[in-house]
Image (spheres, rainbow, N blue to C red):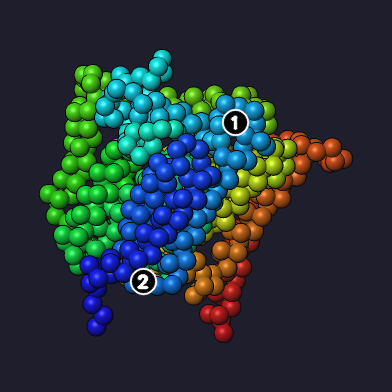
Amino acid sequence: MKTFLPSRCFARDLKWIIPASLGVGAFLSALDGGTWWIGWLAYSFILALGLSALAALWRRAGAGRTLAWMLLLTLFLRLGLGIALTYILPVAGYPTDVQQAGYVFRDAFTRDTQAWSLANSNHPVLSSFAKSYRVGAAHSADQYGGLLALSALVYRYLSPDIHRPWLIILLAALVAAIGVALTWKAARQAWGASVGAFAAWIMALYPESILLGSSQMREPFLITFIAMLFLGAVTWQARRRTAIAWMAGGLAGMLLFSPGVAIFALLVTGGFLWLRRGVHISWRLALAVPGVGIAAVLLLWLGLARGSLAGASLFETLANWLGYSAQWDLYLTQRASDGLQPLFDALPKFLHLPLVTAYGLFQPVLPAAIADPAPWPWYTLAIFRALGWYALLPLLIFALIASWKVAPKNERRAWLWLWLATWGWIVLSSARAGGDQWDNPRYRVILILFQAALAAGAWTYWRAARSPWFGRILAVEGVFLVLFGYWYADRYTDWPLWSLSFLQVVLGIAFIGFLILLGGWGWDRREKRKKLVE
């Protein structure tokens, strides 16, 4: 039996980690500005820490060649795209302050700029957690303070001479690669090698994840912290102490970056384990885990915020968050989409939010991405992101059918719970962000671990059973793309097309899709009766 010796393996890995870190760090510093040796040491330090963590996880996961390629692709795709966009956007993007500075997301631009200001101020880094903290005349751009504090910490102690945004891109790319390694190990532990490998590939190559991992955004960190939590949960029976460490690390990270995500991830993971019955959870533990999470959120807010936080204001915030934000995004969608406006006028007001939520489920819309006359970087990114979502969406729908076929019964219940929780999060993201083609997919991708697992399970089932329902789901998606492609072509081109209203397109998709599904169901019943007669 092969024995894992951490000290010997670590010494062996340092022989390539140190030269690689110094070499890549020197290259990045040469491309960047400021004092060269400061940049060199900063990039090399972060690379050495990240590569050491990746090497350790790679060895713990079996040191396979496939995983090594997966981790390298994850790292270099995100780092390369992030650096490339800082050169491309100021030249070929829109003439906004965000893009002229080389940022894709306004949130990233605002938070990263404030982090640099905080790093160069006399304020402690922990002041980023205070709701009353201001940078100049503006409030803190980070809702929870975690990424603002981390960025300010990096800038203050590793890059005191100039603002180096690539340091945070490098950190996000390394953290994303760590999340892929954790997913590989956790999914294989929970569902076997084929599902584990497929899920990890989705985590590594999903376009929205790549784009966010190449930016100064918090989503790559949240995705990895969820993977930590899940890895701890699925290894609870085998190695209690290691499992507790993973779960504690994942929970602590999520609380710093988004307490709401932490609570939801705890509920999803706890429900999965309870229904699966692979781990016997007492009612005390079932109450204690979310209780500890909620208590930690309260302590974080009360302990780090400088102002007082009354209980009433906290509950009011929790109660009104979804309603206010959904109404605001509903207003923005109504203003932005002239195609939806006739439907808003025709439908009663209480149906507006469901309409925008349904519209948000298909964002970013692939036909719109193809037809929209945007500058080439945004045109390419829009198609890239939309292709990823429209490749994943049929598998997420088909996963319901695949979950019903899982045996034994407790495993089936666990898969169905994951499907319900994942789709609940997707719908919540659409309700929260409406038809926004940026915030909506960004919120949705936070739970990419569970989406990847469902897609991997659905694909594995289809390969074994060759269920015709997957083809029918693809056919309905094809009808959606063709009809909406026609509608967008009529809007954005001068082709002599017969104009269709938005409502006509929606009704056409619903009618043809219904015929496809009903015809498939009827065909299956006919074939079943024929087999019984024979």
Compared to residue 435, the image places residue 6 above or below, namely: below
Numbered badge on residue 100 = 1
Q: Position of residue 211 (x, y in %)?
A: 52, 46
Q: Quadrant of residue 438?
A: top right
Q: Position of residue 229 (x, y in %)?
A: 28, 53
Mark 1 or mark 2, which has the lower sequence index?
2
Q: Quadrant of residue 310?
A: top left
Q: Is residue 376 left or right of residue 117?
A: right
Compared to residue 525, the image places residue 45 above or below, namely: above
Compared to residue 390, the image places residue 256 above or below, namely: above
Q: Residue furthest bottom?
A: 534
The one of 88 and 47 positioned closer to us in this rendering? 47
Q: Amino acid at mark 2?
A: Ala
Q: Which residue is mark 2?
A: 63
Q: Secondary structure at mark 1?
A: helix
Q: Is residue 294 left or right of residue 489?
A: left
Q: Residue at x 47, y 36 (%)?
A: 34
Compared to residue 32, the image places residue 59 above or below, namely: below
Q: Quadrant of residue 277?
A: bottom left
Q: Quadrant of the C terminus?
A: bottom right
Q: Amino acid at mark 1?
A: Gln
Q: Secondary structure at mark 2?
A: loop
| Residue 275 visible to the viewer | no
The one of 357 and 523 positioned closer to us in this rendering? 357
Q: Position of residue 62 (x, y in %)?
A: 34, 72
The one of 230 and 34 positioned closer to us in this rendering? 34
Q: Residue at x 36, y 26 (%)?
A: 120
Q: Position of residue 49 (x, y in %)?
A: 33, 53
| Residue 49 visible to the viewer | yes
Which tag is nearer the camera, tag 1 or tag 2?
A: 1
Q: Residue furthest left?
A: 284
Categorize mark 1 by other alpha carbons within 10 Å: few (<14), some (14-19), many (20+): some
